[in-house]
Image (cartoon, rainbow, N blue to C red):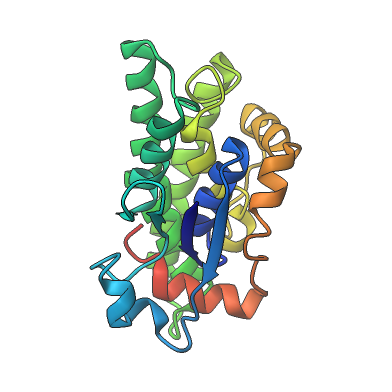
Amino acid sequence: MIDLYTAATPNGHKVSIALEELALPYQAHVLSFDQQEQKAPEFLRINPNGRIPAIVDRDNDDFAVFESGAILYYLAEKTGQLLPADAKDRSVALQWLMFQMGGVGPMQGQANVFYRYFPEKIPSAINRYQTETRRLYTVLNHRLEQVEYLAGDYSIADIATYPWVALHDWAGVSVDELPALQRWMQALAARPAVQKGLQVPVRATADEHSIQTAQTMLVK
């Protein structure tokens, strides 16, 4: 059994999607940001950074894993799924996973904050992060013109990236004229495990999502 500590954010939904794809039994513990549960001492023992998501693998000596990319990698290694066996192909999947962790997440997270949440509208900041997010989308589109999924076959790289790109409107970033990216988005949206994972927990309302963005996505 996996204990999943999560909230309705793209980073949280990455892990619930992966757990659904892998058909691993899990129990979701939804943390309240309003009550600062992610900063509580008992959670900090699981994730010293005080952010979601995190997991505890009850079948592996209560082993705790934090950071969404590290969790996806751990689950893929645990099951032997969602990562290629070949070393080069595996490296490709991990490269695109890191592309999301180091690029799409941080830039789109900042676009979310400055476009939707920040109390002062700063056009230069909004433009900077929306423009960079759109640039990263074009990189994804170019890759997906060549392959069906980011690593060729469906993998944790796709699972990591989709919950962010699916919220492009919230960041004020268009996917127009990116047909390969749109095709990929439609393919992932149709997967039953993706649909189920996005409901664990149910996506926040617009106002709630804005608050969560500011609290959890500034550096992801």
Q: Position of residue 204 (x, y in %)?
A: 64, 71
- Residue 129: name its quadrant: bottom left
Judging depth in this view, the residue of 38 and 99 nearest the camera is 38
Judging depth in this view, the residue of 114 and 157 nearest the camera is 157
Please name the residue shown 58% across and 19% down the image: 145
Q: Position of residue 137 (x, y in %)?
A: 51, 39
144 with respect to 217 (left or right) = right
Please name the residue shown 61% across and 32% down the image: 181
Question: Most extreme residue toward the bottom, as rendered?
Answer: 35
Judging depth in this view, the residue of 58 and 126 nearest the camera is 58
Q: Is residue 132 above or below residue 124?
A: above
153 with respect to 97 (left or right) = right
Please name the residue shown 61% across and 19% down the image: 148
Q: Position of residue 184 (x, y in %)?
A: 65, 31
Q: Position of residue 209 (x, y in %)?
A: 57, 72
Q: Look at the image and tell me whether residue 103 can be seen.
A: no
Q: Quadrant of the C terminus?
A: bottom left
- Residue 190: name its quadrant: top right
Q: Look at the image and tell me whether residue 57 can be seen.
A: yes
Q: Is residue 5 above or below residue 91?
A: below
Q: How many marks?
A: 0
Please name the residue shown 71% across and 32% down the image: 187
